Image (tube, coloured by chain):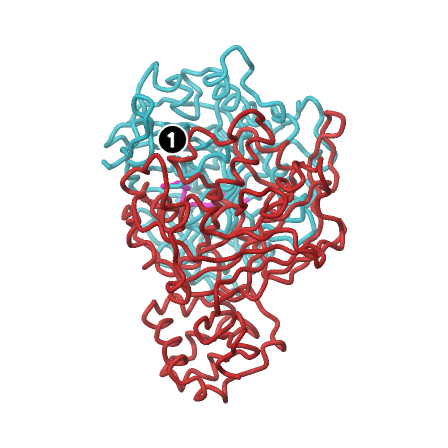
Chain colours: A red, B cyan
Amino acid sequence: VIAAEGSPFSLANLPFGVARGRAHLALGERAIDLVEAAPLLDLDPSIVDGRRLDGLLAAGPATWRGVRAAIQEDPERFEPAMVDRASLHMELPVTIGDYVDGYGGIHHASTCGQIFRPDTDGLTPNYRSVPVAYHGRSGTIVVSGTDIRRPAGQVLVDGAPVLAPTAMLDFELELGVIVGVGNEPGRPIPVDRADEHLFGYVLVNDWSARDVQAWESMPLGPYLGKSFATSISPWVITIDALAPHRVVGLAGEQDPPPLSYLRGDPAVPDLHLSVDVDGERVTDVDLAPSLYWTAAQQLAHATVNGATVRPGDLFASGTISGTDRLTQSGSLLERTWRGTEGRFLQDGDVVVMDGRVGDVGFGGLTGRIVEA
Amino acid sequence: VIAAEGSPFSLANLPFGVARGRAHLALGERAIDLVEAAPLLDLDPSIVDGRRLDGLLAAGPATWRGVRAAIQEDPERFEPAMVDRASLHMELPVTIGDYVDGYGGIHHASTCGQIFRPDTDGLTPNYRSVPVAYHGRSGTIVVSGTDIRRPAGQVLVDGAPVLAPTAMLDFELELGVIVGVGNEPGRPIPVDRADEHLFGYVLVNDWSARDVQAWESMPLGPYLGKSFATSISPWVITIDALAPHRVVGLAGEQDPPPLSYLRGDPAVPDLHLSVDVDGERVTDVDLAPSLYWTAAQQLAHATVNGATVRPGDLFASGTISGTDRLTQSGSLLERTWRGTEGRFLQDGDVVVMDGRVGDVGFGGLTGRIVEA
């Protein structure tokens, strides 16, 4: 039971989450209440007793590594602190200060560009030089299971703007990393030390209203087309848990070679990602052959101008799509060629994302569309 | 003395700020320590004893209005709680969750557009329909007086990207509003009720690296060209203090009329804004004839898709420029026509912004450029 065979929440995974205002670790069908387990871990319970994992992040990597190591060494010892995982109502795992959304999925970037600029490769001239990104709205990040109300916004009807519920509601499949250790102002994070600043991974669904986004984005980029909601998975897989599953994919073939501040280990987690809509599998895609810019490169880039990152900050990869548009698209924008070959999300649709490699997985990221 | 004649911090102003980890109110050359004054105000001192004004915001408008009203009624009574304002080291006034930067200064938008697209009016087709905005980085907002280190970034040299200190460091003169009362998810803020959600105004200097920004912004907008630092003034002028100084300017002439969710009172504070660089006045501009989209419209727009705003969120107006490019530009990008008619900021330059109407003013927003 405790080995949790077959579960994405294996003993090798032990991801952190928050429920009932307390930090927990998932293990198979159960979860370890870290407040209850604190005495067994020689842990100040106030570190893990709070609405978010913020106290654990503040305690630093030695603490969060120590917790997982102690449980992996002798999980039976923690039986008294275990609860039925299905009984937990999961909460947002961390307080997210700033949320940066990247554009590192090159097939997504290419296809989206081609939809609006046919007869090109779709990539802007800076794509292979700059890990392009923008800031999203941190205050509307919600945890898996939160209903997503169809947003209203300005859309063009017969060329004239009207306020209407979006007719082009979409998902975006992304991998996110959560910062665990910040940097000082003016002290960029070297690309080869980025992992030391990361706490772990979540799945991200960057819900998008394509009609709103298209009309508003000139000249400063997306705003209300994205800001209504962004969903993240509740269980944070630590950097350590995915470390044995790193593989070099597309980021190892960056051509031209990036500027030196972006040159580092190109390995990324060998995750297989999927999207189901209303129980139908619409997307199966591997991260490594699809991701041009790594999280480490995102972090090095984000701080090269002296900017700080804070514990809890979220960096999302950008939409992950493979090369086969009909079976590997990380968004319906691509899969339906902007709605001309299929439909966007309908009210009542349930979108389930997942990601897994071996015995380490996220356990799903779910959102249901409700009417405007 | 207490009437503070001639000071921007008149009894009519009484702006809130934070120093020594406590809330203060500025009055002439002095400041009232609100922790010391709490017993006189029947105030729980824990509301005003904290690193930010967050406790005061959480206490709600009746509290912050009551504090100002009690002091205005009988300022002498608060003499025992007064300190020499010059002795205070001002801190960031609020915890800023999300920072949204608008584009409401139409002359700025027009001139910037013309720099890159000559022979047009410079405005994108959505300009008069959408209060265009993007999310900035909240974690790098700093208080007046903080040195600004010249940021490095990717810039093009002979068409090839290199990592170098920006050669086009610029200021942006903006008016910011700070949210005092949030909204519930899915409950947009009506434009005519926006003021009920606002706490007050600050000046904003949205420092910009124009060369970095130009290369990175395709297709998702500004990122590192802005994220290194944004400065705000330390004293927050309340909505109430500027209410008697509202005037209808350009926002009263919106043509075509905006969509109904954006139609409301077009009055804005009748502020005169200025910028000095190294003691030389470079910009004098009035807000009302320059601002196309009001803060109330920004807030109504930001929430029309169901998004929430939180107490402490900052909305900046966008750069405020007048019609005379050489004397009324809110940025050097415009004043120098992208560096072809003058220089951007040099190391050692001190940029001082200010804003005032009658006996209500900000008391300055200062930043000094230090070398990369």
Is residue B164 shown above or below A103? above
Taking the image as shown, residue A72 lies to the left or right of residue B188, namely left
Residue at image location 67% in from the left, 48% down from the top: B306
Q: Quadrant of residue B336?
A: top left
Residue at the top extreme?
B119
Taking the image as shown, residue A1 lies to the left or right of residue B85, namely right
Residue at image location 57% in from the left, 35% down from the top: A112
Please tell me which residue lies in front, B260 or B306: B306
The stretch in magenta equals: B228-238
Q: Which residue is mark 1?
A: B171
Q: Give percent across and percent down for residue A5.
A: 52, 77
Q: Quadrant of residue A21?
A: bottom right
Please tell me which residue lies in front, A126 or B214: A126
Please tell me which residue lies in front, A170 or A150: A170
Residue at image location 46% in from the left, 73% down from the top: A14
Tally of numbered discs: 1
Q: Give percent across and percent down for residue B184.
A: 66, 55
Is residue B174 shown above or below A347? above
Residue B363 shows in the view: no
Q: Secondary structure at mark 1?
A: loop
Q: Give percent across and percent down for residue B23.
A: 43, 56
Is residue A323 shown above or below A26? above
Q: Give percent across and percent down for residue A213.
A: 62, 37
Give neighbour class at mark 1: few <14, some 14-19, many 20+ (Cα, 10 Å): many
* Chain letter, disc 1 residue: B
Label 1 amino acid?
Answer: Phe
- Does residue B229 show up magenta in the picture? yes
